[in-house]
Amino acid sequence: MAWTKPPEGWNQQTTERIASSVQARRKAKKMTAAQLADRTAELGHPLSRSVISDIETGRKRSLEVGELIVLAAALGVPPIVLIYPDIPDGEVEALPGWQVPSGAALDWFSGDGALSRTRTADDITHFETLPVDRDQQELVRAVRAYRRTKRALMRMIADEMIADDSRTPAEIEAGRRIQRQLSEEVERLRERIGELGGVIDEDPLGIQEESGRDGA
């Protein structure tokens, strides 16, 4: 639902889009504003029913980062879905004057790609890409790969612990070879993340943390 009073400028337009996303998700889950408020309180950052109503109707014209995060958590969705609700192909103004597909905005926001646009000036079409710190982009990608590879390794270790004796020697060796490859990749990514300035736990495998999360 659009605000009663139209937004002014890009910042308010972005807030209105998020507010509409919040309301749509809330209604899809058949939650009242009061129930959503209660859930934010349970999560430790309470937003009153009146504040949520003000966000949705536009009486509140701005949104704090903490409000966005707790609303997303209370609704059970990634925050990025509230920011870019029309992924992947719906057009969004990611920055003032930067009209791009929502999927491209999502990639940029999450560190997976650069933000690019085409614009026409003096009958000439220009292609423009927003500068991005390559090391920080690589860090985000490396962290994703590290966590994905570590989870795969943990699953293999867990499967190995409960495996029966029906496997052939060739199957056992193949499994161990894959484990070694995953372990080597985890260590390689771990070292690269450190070189890029990332913060890495001293336990490279994090067996208790990851196995507990996967089983949740």
Image (tube, rainbow, N blue to C red):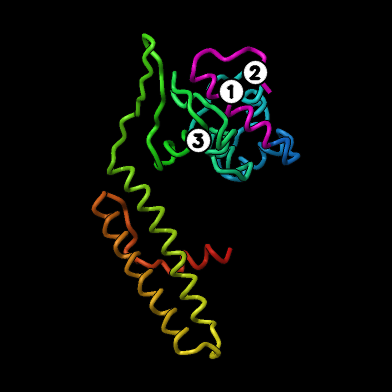
Between marks 3 and 2 in the image, the one whose residue lies nearer the viewer: 2
Evaluate if marks 2 and 1 touch, with contact meaning CB atoms under 8 Å apart.
yes
Of the residues shown, which amino acid type is indicated by label 3?
A: Gly
Q: Which element type, helix, strand or loop, lies under badge 2?
A: loop
Dot 1 crowding, Cα within 10 Å, few <14, some 14–19, many 20+ = many
Return the x and y of residue 190 as percentages of the image width and height.
31, 60
- Residue 87 sits in which quadrant? top right
Residue 58 in percent (x, y) is at 62, 19
- In three-dimensional space, the C-alpha distance between marks 1 and 3, rounded to whole angstroms, equals 17 Å
Q: Within 10 angstroms of label 2, few (less than 14), some, or many (20 or more) residues?
A: some
Q: Label 2 is placed on what type of residue?
A: Trp
Q: Nearer the viewer, mark 1 or mark 3?
A: 1
Q: CA distance from mark 2 to mark 1?
A: 7 Å
Q: Magenta segment range?
A: 1-25
Sequence-first disc among 1 and 3: 1
In the picture of the structure, the residue carrying the numbered disc 2 is 3
Task: Say which element carries label 3.
Answer: helix
Q: Residue 16 — which label?
A: 1
Distance between the alpha carbons at the discs numbered 3 and 2: 22 Å
Q: Which residue bears the numbered disc 3?
A: 66
Q: Amino acid at mark 1?
A: Glu
